[in-house]
């Protein structure tokens, strides 16, 4: 695996200094073409103070990516890719020489001691930001984070038990801790200015070219410990809860063990009242069905 070596431009650790590092290839002699952009925290003497002072805190040192900043002479191409940080973990071992985990990037943000964080603890913070100044340009995509899992092996009789593009896990493992809200995954959209064509807070996409599939679900809820979890819930329990008064549009059928309306509907006054084909209204005396545009039929309900 490649070695990451750092070479400082200066021996002092000023917060604004520029430093460079080279990515050395496996032969330990040649240098890769890329010089990446990163932010390293170095513990040492703060030469920015006058006089210089010793500091026990970590001071930022900027690694400038000379390829991502155009000098006006080096040509750029639409096929060029720039990386702020590029991490690669590769294990190339012989048969029978196995390892347990292999991570291209492993980040941990840990709070210890008596101090606390007033806002957020995060293992990673990723942002895709378009602040370009060019006119009449089209950006194909801006991703805050892009995760991909791919099975592309050449060995025979291989099985991947779980192939997940992204996995979110939240854990509460302390009797003295109260977590007010727990969201293993959350999606949020904010619009403060501009124009949006279509917004889907969460979009599911199923692309198929070839191969066989036994079962397929766009959403699958399956939990072996459900019985115990169900008993532990003392308040509301819903599979899906929506406070948004929008209808749901399904292209397929709906199968459930029970059906209920949250409240009785407004009764249809005349047989030609406004209505959409297939619309159903439940009232205390009738069930109304719209059989054609603005055409209603009803069936009376009686006590027994």
Image (spheres, helix red, strand yellow):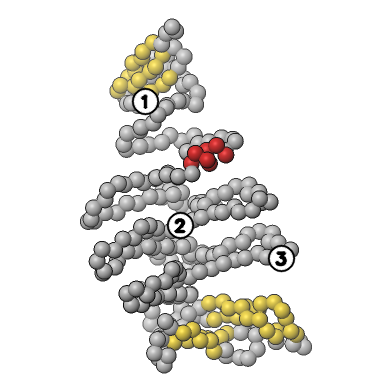
Q: Residue at x 33, y 16 (%)?
A: 297
SS for dot 1: loop
Residue 118, x across and y down, in percent: 69, 59
Q: Which mark is residue 139?
A: none
Tell me which residue sits at (50%, 23%) in the image: 263
Q: Nearer the viewer, mark 1 or mark 2?
A: 2
Pointer 1: what residue? 279
Q: Which residue is mark 3?
A: 113
Query: Farthest right residue?
Result: 51
Compute the Cα span from label 2 to label 3: 29 Å
- Asked whether residue 241 is in view, the answer is no
Q: Which residue is mark 2?
A: 167
Q: Residue 260: percent from the left, percent from the top?
A: 45, 25
Crowd class of label 1 (few under 14; some 14 to 19; many from 20; radius 10 Å): few
Q: Earlier in the sequence, mark 1 or mark 3?
A: 3
Task: Out of 99 and 287, give the one closest to the viewer.
Answer: 99
Q: CA distance from mark 1 to mark 3?
A: 61 Å
Asked whether disc 1 touches disc 3, contact meaning CB atoms under 8 Å apart, the reply is: no
N-terminal of the pair, mark 2 or mark 3, is 3
The image shows residue 229, relative to residue 136, as above or below, that is above
Question: Which residue is more in the foreground, 77 or 117?
Answer: 117
**Considering the numbered disc 2 on the image, is that residue within a helix, a strand or a loop?**
loop
In the structure shown, which secondary structural element does the residue marked by tag 3 occupy? Answer: loop
Q: Is residue 67 above or below residue 282?
A: below
Looking at this view, is 175 or 196 the one in front? 175
Quadrant in the picture for residue 97: bottom left
Mark 2 crowdedness (10 Å alpha carbons): few <14, some 14-19, many ≥20: few
Residue at horizontal 59 percent and vertical 52 percent from the top: 172
């Amino acid at each position: 695996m490649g070695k990451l070596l750092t070479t400082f431009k200066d021996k002092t650790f000023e917060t604004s200094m520029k430093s460079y590092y080279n990515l050395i290839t496996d032969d330990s002699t040649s240098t890769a073409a890329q010089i990446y952009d990163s932010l390293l925290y170095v513990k040492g003497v703060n030469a920015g103070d006058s006089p210089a002072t010793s500091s026990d805190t970590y001071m930022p040192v900027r690694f400038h990516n000379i390829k991502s900043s155009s000098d006006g002479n080096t040509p750029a191409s639409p096929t060029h890719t720039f990386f702020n940080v590029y991490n690669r973990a590769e294990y190339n071992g012989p048969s029978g020489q196995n390892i347990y985990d292999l991570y291209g990037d492993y980040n941990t943000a840990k709070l210890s001691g008596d101090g606390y964080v007033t806002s957020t603890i995060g293992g990673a913070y990723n942002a895709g930001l378009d602040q370009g100044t060019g006119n009449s340009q089209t950006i194909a995509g801006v991703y805050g984070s892009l995760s991909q899992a791919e099975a592309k092996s050449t060995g025979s009789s291989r099985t991947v038990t779980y192939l997940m593009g992204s996995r979110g896990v939240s854990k509460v493992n302390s009797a003295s801790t109260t977590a007010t809200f727990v969201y293993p995954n959350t999606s949020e959209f904010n619009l403060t200015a501009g124009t949006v064509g279509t917004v889907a807070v969460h979009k599911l996409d199923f692309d198929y070219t070839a191969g066989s599939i036994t079962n397929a679900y766009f959403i699958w809820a399956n939990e072996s410990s459900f019985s115990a979890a169900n008993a532990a819930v003392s308040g509301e329990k819903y599979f899906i809860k929506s406070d948004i008064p929008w209808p749901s549009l399904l292209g397929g059928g709906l199968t459930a063990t029970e059906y209920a309306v949250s409240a009785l509907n407004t009764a249809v006054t005349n047989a030609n009242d406004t209505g959409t084909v297939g619309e159903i209204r439940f009232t205390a005396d009738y069930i109304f069905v719209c059989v054609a545009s603005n055409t209603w039929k009803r069936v009376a309900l009686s006590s027994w």
